[in-house]
Image (cartoon, helix red, strand yellow):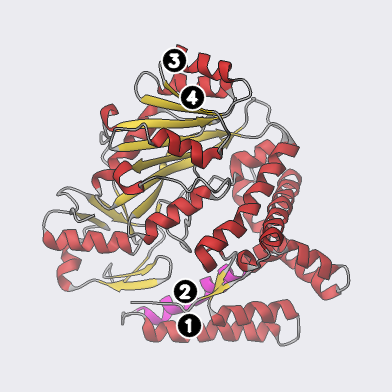
C-alpha cells in the first residue's frame, strides 16, 4: 500500500457533504467531521473537483478519500482489460441461473465456476463445459465463503470478481469497476445490487424486494467502513485486488462472511468503495417462505459478527446526548419533548464551539443538531420495529406506553414509503416491510440466544468528533 495515487486521478466532493464558507469548509462523513482547507488546498479544489497533478493535490485527495468526503470520478472510457480480471462463481445447483450468468460473461471474461457439492453436478458441469468456463468441484458443501476461496486459489489475474449465480451482470460493469483500482490503496469495490423479479408480473413481496432489497445499499457513492453510511458490501457481486485479500473470506462463516471480509480489510488500512453508478440485478426469491427464510438467516449472522468485531455490529450508534433524548421520548412523560429539545440545543452548542470558524457556523451547527435528532428518531424506530421487536412486542402486551411507542415508531417508519410510492401500493409496502423486520429480528435474536451473547443487540455510544 506504499504506492501513490497516479497523476490524473480525480475525485469530487460527495453530494451529501455540507459545504460552507465559499467551499473552504466541508462537514460530513461518518463519524461526523469538519475539514477546513488551507489557502493552498483551497486553490486546488475547483467546483468541488480535485485532480492529482503534484504532491499537494495527491495529499489532499488521499485525505479526502480517507475522510469519506470525496469519491472518484471515472472517465467514460476507463476500465480494466479482460486480461486483468477473473470471475469466480460459487454455485450449488441453479444450473439455469448459472447458464444465464455465464452466457453474459463468456467469452469476454475468464470464469471459474465452483460447484459447492450440487445435488445434480452433471447439470452444472454441462453448462460450464458448453460455455467454456473452468470448473472446480467440491465434494463437500462448504458454503459461499469456502466456495469463493476455492475459486480464488485458481486465479492468476491481479483482479477477481466474485459473482453469485443468481446475479445478472454485464462484463462491461465488472471491467468498468476495475478502473477504481487506479487507487493503489483500494482493496474492494462493489456495484449497486438491485432486486429483480423473474417475471413481468411480480408478486407483492417481489415488488418490495425490487425497491428495498437487503442487498440494495442505496444510490449514493461512498467509502465503506464500519459505522459508515455504507458499512458493508454484499458478497453477491464484488471486485477485489487479489494481492490485498490474502486467502479471502472466513470459510468458517456461512452467513455474514461478506461483512467480516470488508471489516477485516478496512481494519488493515485498505480502502473499500461502493459505486452505485454501476448496477447488477439479483433475482428475487420465488416464494414468501424462501424470501422470509433468507431474511431470518441474515439476522442470525449478527452474533458471529459481534464475536469477531465487537460493538461494530451494534444495531444503532448514538451520542450520549441523543441517547438521553431517545430514552426520554420512549418514557412518554410530559417532560420528554423538553428533554429532546434540550438535547438538540446541547448538540448545537457543542458543534458551534467545535466547527471551524465560518460566517455561517451557528446556522450550520443548528442544522447538524436537528439532523441528529431526525437520525436518532429513525434509529429508535428501527430498534423497536426490527432489531428489538421481540422485546417491544412482549412489553406491548402489558404496557399502553409500549404500545404507543410501537405505534409512533411505525408512523416514523412510514416516511420510507414516500420515495417508492409509484412502484408499490402502501398496503403491500407496509406488510412486506413489517414481515422483513420480523424475520430479520427473529434471526438476530435466535443467533444471540445460540451464542449466549447480547453483543449484537446492544446500542453503541460514541462521542461526536470534528476536526
Q: Earlier in the sequence, mark 2 or mark 3?
A: 3
Q: Which of marks 1 and 2 is nearer the N terminus?
A: 1
Q: Are marks 3 and 4 in contact (CB under 8 Å)?
A: no
Q: In this view, does 265 lie to the left or right of 210?
A: left
Residue highlighted by disc 1: 348
Considering every residue shown, the one lying at the far left of the view is 54
Residue highlighted by disc 4: 101
Q: In which quarter of the image is the C terminus?
A: bottom left
In this rendering, the label closer to the viewer, 4 or 1: 4
Q: Do the residues labelled 1 and 2 touch (CB within 8 Å)?
A: yes
Q: How far apart are marks 1 and 3 (CA)?
A: 61 Å
- Of residue 154 and residue 129, the one placed in the foreground of this image is 154
Q: Could you say whether the residue bearing mark 1 is in a helix, strand or loop?
A: helix
Considering every residue shown, the one lying at the far right of the view is 398
Considering every residue shown, the one lying at the far top of the view is 130
- Around disc 4, counting alpha carbons within 10 Å, would you say few (fewer than 14), some (14 to 19), or many (20 or more)? many
Residue highlighted by disc 3: 131
Q: Which residue is drawn at 80% across and 72% down?
A: 402
Q: How far apart are marks 4 and 2 (CA)?
A: 45 Å
- Around disc 3, counting alpha carbons within 10 Å, would you say few (fewer than 14), some (14 to 19), or many (20 or more)? some
Question: Against 394, is 238 above or below?
Answer: above
Would residue 224 be visible to someone looking at this image?
Answer: no
- Of residue 325 and residue 454, the one placed in the foreground of this image is 454
Q: Position of residue 363 (x, y in %)?
A: 43, 78
Q: Which of marks 4 and 1 is nearer the N terminus?
A: 4
Q: Which mark is residue 368?
A: 2
Residue stretch in magenta = 360-377
Q: Could you say whether the residue bearing mark 3 is in a helix, strand or loop?
A: loop
Q: Which mark is residue 192?
A: none
Amino acid at each position: 500500500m506504499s504506492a501513490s495515487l497516479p497523476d490524473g486521478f480525480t475525485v469530487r466532493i460527495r453530494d451529501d457533504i455540507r459545504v460552507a464558507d465559499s467551499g473552504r469548509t466541508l462537514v460530513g462523513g461518518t463519524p461526523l467531521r469538519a475539514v477546513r482547507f488551507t489557502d493552498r488546498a483551497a486553490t486546488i479544489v475547483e467546483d468541488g473537483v480535485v485532480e492529482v497533478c503534484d504532491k499537494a493535490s495527491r495529499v489532499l485527495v488521499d485525505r479526502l478519500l480517507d475522510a469519506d468526503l470525496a469519491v472518484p470520478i471515472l472517465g467514460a472510457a476507463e476500465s480494466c482489460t479482460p486480461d486483468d480480471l477473473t470471475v469466480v462463481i460459487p454455485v450449488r445447483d441453479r444450473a439455469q441461473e448459472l447458464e444465464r450468468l455465464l452466457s453474459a460473461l463468456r467469452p469476454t471474461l475468464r470464469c471459474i465456476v465452483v460447484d459447492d457439492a450440487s445435488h445434480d453436478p452433471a447439470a452444472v458441469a454441462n453448462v460450464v463445459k458448453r460455455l467454456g468456463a473452468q470448473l472446480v468441484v467440491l465434494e463437500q458443501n462448504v458454503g459461499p465463503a469456502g466456495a469463493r476461496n476455492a475459486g480464488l486459489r485458481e486465479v492468476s489475474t491481479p483482479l477477481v470478481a466474485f459473482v453469485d449465480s443468481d446475479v445478472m451482470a454485464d462484463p462491461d460493469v465488472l471491467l468498468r469497476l476495475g478502473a477504481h483500482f487506479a487507487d493503489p490503496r483500494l482493496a474492494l469495490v462493489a456495484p449497486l445490487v438491485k432486486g429483480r423479479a423473474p417475471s413481468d408480473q411480480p408478486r407483492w413481496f417481489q415488488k418490495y424486494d425490487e425497491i428495498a432489497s437487503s442487498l440494495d445499499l442505496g444510490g449514493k457513492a461512498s467509502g465503506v467502513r464500519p459505522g459508515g453510511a455504507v458499512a458493508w458490501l454484499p458478497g453477491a457481486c464484488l471486485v477485489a485486488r487479489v494481492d490485498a485479500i490474502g486467502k479471502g473470506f472466513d470459510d468458517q462463516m456461512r452467513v455474514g462472511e461478506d461483512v467480516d471480509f470488508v471489516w477485516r480489510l478496512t481494519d488493515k488500512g485498505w480502502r473499500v468503495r461502493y459505486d452505485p453508478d454501476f448496477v447488477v440485478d439479483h433475482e428475487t426469491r420465488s416464494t414468501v417462505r424462501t424470501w422470509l427464510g433468507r431474511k431470518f438467516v441474515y439476522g442470525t449472522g449478527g452474533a458471529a459478527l459481534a464475536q469477531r468485531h465487537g460493538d461494530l455490529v451494534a444495531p444503532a450508534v448514538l451520542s450520549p446526548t441523543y441517547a438521553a433524548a431517545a430514552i426520554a421520548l420512549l418514557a412518554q412523560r410530559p417532560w420528554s419533548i423538553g428533554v429532546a429539545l434540550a438535547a438538540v440545543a446541547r448538540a448545537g452548542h457543542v458543534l458551534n464551539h467545535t466547527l471551524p470558524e465560518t460566517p455561517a457556523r451557528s446556522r450550520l451547527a443548528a442544522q447538524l443538531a436537528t439532523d441528529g435528532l431526525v437520525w436518532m428518531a429513525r434509529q429508535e424506530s428501527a430498534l423497536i420495529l426490527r432489531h428489538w421487536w421481540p422485546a417491544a412486542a412482549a412489553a406491548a402486551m402489558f404496557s399502553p406506553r409500549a404500545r404507543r411507542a410501537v405505534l409512533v415508531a411505525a408512523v416514523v417508519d412510514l416516511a420510507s414509503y414516500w420515495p417508492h410510492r409509484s412502484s408499490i401500493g402502501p398496503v403491500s409496502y407496509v406488510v412486506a416491510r413489517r414481515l422483513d423486520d420480523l424475520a430479520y429480528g427473529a434471526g438476530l435474536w435466535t443467533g444471540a440466544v445460540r451464542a449466549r451473547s447480547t453483543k449484537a443487540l446492544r446500542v453503541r455510544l460514541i462521542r461526536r468528533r470534528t476536526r
